[in-house]
Amino acid sequence: MAMAVEVEVEEQSENWRLQIGQYMGEISALSFLPHPSLSSLPFLLAGSGSQLLVYDLDLGKMITSFYVFQGIRVHGITCCCNDQIAVFGERRVKLFSLAMAAADLKLTLLQSLPKFGSWVLDVCFFKGQESSFLAVGCSDNSVYLWDISKSSVVLQLQSPEKSLLYSMRLWGDSLEALRIASGTIYNEIIVWKVVPDDSLANSLQHHDPNYRAVHVCKLVGHEGSIFRLSWSSNGSKLVSVSDDRSARVWEVCSGTEASDELRETVGLVLFGHSARVWDCCIFDSLIVTAGEDCTCRLWKLDGKQLQMIKEHLGRGIWRCLYDPKFSLLITAGFDSSIKVHQLHTSLSLEGHSEAKEINRTNIYTARTPSSSDHVGLMDSKSEYVRCLRFTCEDILYVATNHGYLYHAKLSENGDVRWTEIVQVSEKVPIVCMDLLSKPFKPGCDVEDWIAVGDGKGNMKVVRVIGDIGSPEVDITFSWSAGQERQLLGTHWCQPLGCGYIFTADPRGTLKLWRLQYPLKPSHNSVGGCNVSLIAELTSCFGIRIMCLDASFEDEVLVCGDIRGNLVLFPLLKSTLVGTSVASDTKIFALNYFKGAHGISTVMSIAVTRLSSNQIEICSTGGDGCICYMEYDRDGQHLEFIGMKHVKELSLIHSVCTDNNSVNGLSSAHYAAGFASVDFIIWNLKTETKVLQIPCGGWRRPHSYYVGDLPEIKNSFAYVKDEVIHIYRHWVLDACRKIYPQNLHIQFHGREMHSLCFISEEIPSGENATPSLFSRSSWIATGCEDGTVRLTRYSPGIENWSESKLLGEHVGGSAVRSLCSVSKIHVFSADMTNITDGREGRNSFEEDREFPFLLISVGAKRVLTSWLLRNRKLNKTEDSLAGKQHIATENDGLPEVSSSSSMTFQWLSTDMPPKYSSSNKFSKNNNKADVDTEEGNMQLKSYNRDKCEDDWRYLAVTAFLVKYAGSRLTVCFVVVACSDATLALRALVLPCRLWFDVALLVPLSSPVLALHHVVVPTHLLSKENIQDGSAYIVISGATDGSIAFWDLTGSVKAFMKRISVLDVEKLIDFQKRPRTGRGSQGGRWWKSLGSGMSKNRTDMESVTVRSGMVAVEKRSGNLSMGSSQVIHIASDKPTDDSSSEICEVCPAHVLENVHQSGVNCLHVSDVKGSQISDGGFLYHLLSGGDDQALHCLRFELTMSLAGQEAEISTPQIKNPVTQLGDAKNVVQSCQNRNSTYNIRFLSHDEVLSAHTSAVKGIWSDGSWVFSAGLDQRIRCWRFEEQGKLTEYDTLIISVPEPEALDARVCSRGYYYQIAVAGRGMQIAEFSASCNRN
């Protein structure tokens, strides 16, 4: 059937097209283009890869993009006043005209200059009397003058000092005024210019001898390579930045005389960057530098640093640009983001912003009325502020140590009007305060409920009403809530309203009080108010509760304590609305999560309802993390679903959403907290800093309030000494632009090593037509900095519409490989011993009956699994106003919205013990030799230094297996390590237990690529359940060999053993990722196994791995034979080299397939691949460092149905096949204990498929796509007998490609190909077929 299909294809007439998509990677050039309307902001031109991006700064978005080169990165852009643009990269320069045509911008190529002999470093436009010229500076320290009207070079000048350059900058608007600054490879700056020999020469002729180059001066002082130069507007000053982490400002002489003097004395040296400085610019009163430390720094001309902006990540900020007319600062870097800041009209000497017209920030300083009367230094009797709370942007409540509660109204003219509300008691300090406010609406009276607790254990509640400027006390009452010095906190709970309040003591006990107010309140009425204690909630940790939130409908209360733990209590409606007073009522925890924020304080908690039995919990803490959890009320199961570590904040007080958010807490856009001594509001969506105020740290009394747009609506107050400092930035103009802006989404800040498409449900049949929906896709990527991202690609002007940070590997260890797995291989078995365990099903079992997993591996042998969360949620957008002292301005009715979201939650992480190796040692730590049948292959293991275990995983592949009717799903993961080991591991779901299953030996060199094939042996007609499967893994190593491994016996034996496992009796201690300050992790793991003997195919040894602890209870022992190994937590380091697991030998080894390393592998089935005798045809494609592609066509034939297959790995060493240079190989290899036969049918080799190493390959059996370091995507097609024929080639913008993956939108007709390396890019391949 396969042959017939191939012949039929040959009879068709086809047209195909390989089209490039938008590149997302480093921004290498920036330039302003004046807007046709002079009153509008200029256009911004950015160079990214080979494309030119055009942004409208008024709209804050990209309006169009153009490809200006092929495979050449844009290094610089220079604009002329008549809409002419010069774009240069490497040795190429092109002239364009960018004009407004109707509503669109049109880019027209005017001229393409000839290729220069050296790299172009700068270009500059000149205006002559009759025509325009373009000066081109090259890296050989020469300048060419190009006549635009004649399209030719009219002058070429060489500097008097010949030298290779790292940088060059031209200044001047004419040839006579031209000055050239050249940064040489000797860390010197040579300044030279062009002068006429004859003063009467007024015109330029071809090779005019009347002009010559003159040396001006040489500037010496840098101790590293000079990366960038910038002239001041009048040409009198020159700024240079260097590899030595400094910027220098030079005074350049303006005389016409030449000078050979070495300028050793430097007027100004700017130190501050902690890494290399990449770019700079200078203006009349401002110097801007940007560096590898991801900071952009602003300096005065006297060398004083004014401001530091740090919002990029990765390898730093590569380009900075400043427009003095509109005070706009643009920064761009390796992370693909372009950020726009509007600087203040002036910058103070203290280094922070003053209140000027642009930022409209009001700064207040105030003292409490009592302390203002005190003169001199503070003493023990002085009054000072203990608590601050904002109720809106201009109203502040202040509590003091003398027991006073004040109301402060901020006026526009800078005054503060004080009103004394109440005095709790004479000279008793207020130790805690909380505020519950009715959202303010214009024209309505305020209603604030203030609860304060004093050092004597007394509580007082005050209700303040009236006009916003003249508050009145309506109700006040007090009661004794605890013993002296035992009342540490009081908490309102917004869902419960003002009728209930909590008090906290140091021992983790919460008291819930019901407040019943009089029908006719009177001032200071106590007797008419009934306060009753209705419950005492005791934490299982016995630690002080710091924050809480509740869900009234779900009857649950969530608390966070001072040591990072979360505790859930039942909060029954009957308890809240009951009339009986039960002061001795004790309520204990429903569930808890230990160490949600490590050992750091939980700062805030917010609860959102997901469904009738599920809630989502968002918590923030002193570890700089935002944690998300789900609680299933029916099963009382609390599950960690995700975490975001905001590295810019060391402590996060709370998070909030904007008005457009429809995804509730999961889409929190802003985080407010502290970094060292600064208060910061951080935009989580755009990764920009909204606000930064130096305040001395979070331990001082402080409060803040934000509106619907925190960028323009925020207030912050803090106390220093006796003075209250208040910053109020509140702009009511809704049309005002919001800064900072992010024009381009932020991506990885370093190189990517792997990527994979995440499939969505789209039509993919033979005749399916790709729609806009099918052209939208999600791509998972792993980066050198340890981060894993999920990025959305969609058609349109901006192809990359969204990028989500899923998380990062432990310690930021690099991610080397990714794979996704969704298909579950289900087969029948004897189910008598399989536990059902369906009671108490939680959200994992209900929503993830068929899990979609993402597996990422990398450095430090970190293996992380992620679980897909792709569902439509109907949520109520709960406002966070008033929670944890952060609020929003609007308080409309809750809106119910439906949105489709895709993301992955962290599932589990497997890390080896610190003092361990994936290689196995003999007792004497001598090398172990393993003989093969043909020749000898040695597996060498040496005793390593236990302090250095820097092995890393290089490749991974995975598949899912489960028994029919069982709730257990097993994800088998095959990982290749850099120490030349290959291991099979198993992740048992839903209990998240890791097991070591088998070690694949022998290996003489590390494996770089892995792929697997799962072949059903027999298919049953009912329910499509497989009677059995063959599990084959194919590996490609650094020595050019390709090996086949039969894991069928190991998989089936493990599934048989795991079927009797009672997962309900296994305790999972790994609840959250081991990242963040003070988080779980760093434990030592000790093996309880002793007297281990080497086990092979009998599968009598299975090792439980990673952070999971298997606890055996009396009624449910895990019996896996005498050689069982189970790891538990221990405080002492130990070497697990004694642990033995089963070994699997290769079924077949193909040597010398490639002359060097096999970088990539892919297996695809042949279209119509199932043959009559029950076998399957496959294509094995491989690419290597030898620039070659190999296609091996093989057939898998199953054993007879009546033949019983042994569940064990064969003990014999299997024949090794050496392909050599053979073009066609027909060889049958049968394993006597295997369930299948492999027959190699043909072998095709393309020796020079790429001009450099092949890094990625993919096929669906019809078309093949490959990518190499030559920055090419090549399209191939299978002909007869698996022969590859090249059909098309495309040049991409991704430097140093590392990985390729593709996605079928319509098999044979439409594909998306993604390539990742230093950036990511998608190409679209489409083919149309017309039958003859």
Image (cartoon, rainbow, N blue to C red):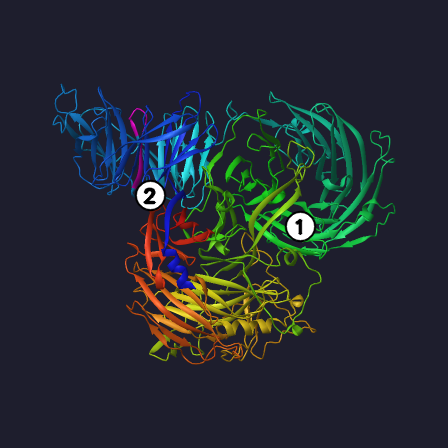
Q: Which residue in the protein does label 2 denote?
A: 244
Q: Is residue 401 left or right of residue 1289?
A: right
* Residue at (58% x, 56% y) in the render: 1072
> Quick one: 236 or 907, which is closer to the camera?
907
Mark 2 is surrounded, within 10 Å at the Cα level, by few (under 14), some (14 to 19) or many (20 or more) other residues, namely: some
Q: Amino acid at mark 1?
A: Asp
Q: Give the CA distance from mark 1 to mark 2.
A: 47 Å
Splitting the image into 4 quarters, where does residue 208 fall?
Answer: top left
Q: Is residue 476 left or right of residue 1007?
A: right
Work out whether 370 lies above or below 491: above
Residue 1257 among those drawn in magenta: no
Mark 1 is surrounded, within 10 Å at the Cα level, by few (under 14), some (14 to 19) or many (20 or more) other residues, namely: many
- Range of residues picked out in magenta: 226-237
Residue 25, how many percent across, how many down?
A: 40, 44
Is residue 946 visible in this depiction of the protein?
yes
Work out whether 48 lies above or below 1135: above
Splitting the image into 4 quarters, where does residue 76 fall?
Answer: top left
Q: Which residue in the protein does label 1 denote?
A: 561
Residue 1062, how many percent across, how many down?
A: 65, 69
Please tell me which of labels 1 and 2 falls first in the chain: 2
Quarter of the N terminus within the rendering: bottom left
